[in-house]
């Protein structure tokens, strides 16, 4: 099985990690560097025996819209079986998967109690998903499945574990 996700590996490693290895997950590409590399350019630095790879955090390629389809074709070379997304920016990869016999799952921002959802926007998004043949997942109905136990919303609109 090949999976393409629009979110980072860290968001799914606790739930799907035992079933899907990281090399089967594609997302936006960030620059990497070696622990001993310092400011030396990649083309001038040779990875050393005691080096470790570090995520630099500089965005190289943002997987958005058609970019997600390009990544699927370039990275795995075959249509995905499953794709997951949460915005219209994920529709291109969803259509690519569904048109080739796969399935697309889109997360609805419909929880106004535990998240900063908007039921009107979620309903509009769900209608667009249905028209494209995508399955939807309700944040409201599946909150306990999606989020770790004890997750609450906070003042800066990010989900974080309760203190």
Image (cartoon, rainbow, N blue to C red):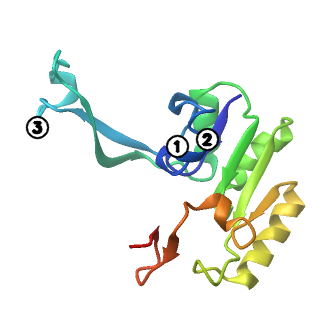
Q: Quadrant of residue 46?
A: top left
In this view, 100 is above or below 111? above
In this view, 114 is above or below 64? below
Residue 35 percent across, percent down from the top left: 17, 32
> Which quadrant, please, contains the N terminus?
top right
Mark 2 near mark 1, Cβ–Cβ under 8 Å? yes
Residue 85 percent across, percent down from the top left: 66, 55
Residue at 64%, 30% in the rendered image: 73
Q: Determine whether, in the image, residue 143 is placed left or right of residue 104.
A: left
Q: Determine whether, in the image, residue 93 is placed left or right of residue 157.
A: right
Foreground pick, 88 / 19 = 19
Residue position marked by numbered label 3 in the rendering: 39
Badge 1 element:
helix
Q: Which mark is residue 158?
A: none
* Marked residue nearer the N-terminal end (2 or 3): 2
Measured Cα–Cα span from mark 2 to mark 3 = 36 Å
Residue position marked by numbered label 2 in the rendering: 16
């Amino acid at each position: 099985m090949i999976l393409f996700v629009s979110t980072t590996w860290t968001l799914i490693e606790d739930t799907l990690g035992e079933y899907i290895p990281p090399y089967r997950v594609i997302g936006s590409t960030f620059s990497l560097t070696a622990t001993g590399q310092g400011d030396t350019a990649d083309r001038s630095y040779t990875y050393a025996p005691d080096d470790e790879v570090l995520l630099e955090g500089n965005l190289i390629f943002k997987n958005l819209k058609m970019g997600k389809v390009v990544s699927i074709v370039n990275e795995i070379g075959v249509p995905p079986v499953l794709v997951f997304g949460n915005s219209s920016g994920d529709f291109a990869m969803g259509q690519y998967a569904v048109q080739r016999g796969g399935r697309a799952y889109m997360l609805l921002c419909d929880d106004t109690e535990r998240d900063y959802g908007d039921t009107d926007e979620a309903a509009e998004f769900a209608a667009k998903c249905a028209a494209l043949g995508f399955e939807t997942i309700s944040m409201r109905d599946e909150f306990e499945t999606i989020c770790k136990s004890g997750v609450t919303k906070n003042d800066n609109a990010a989900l974080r574990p309760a203190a």
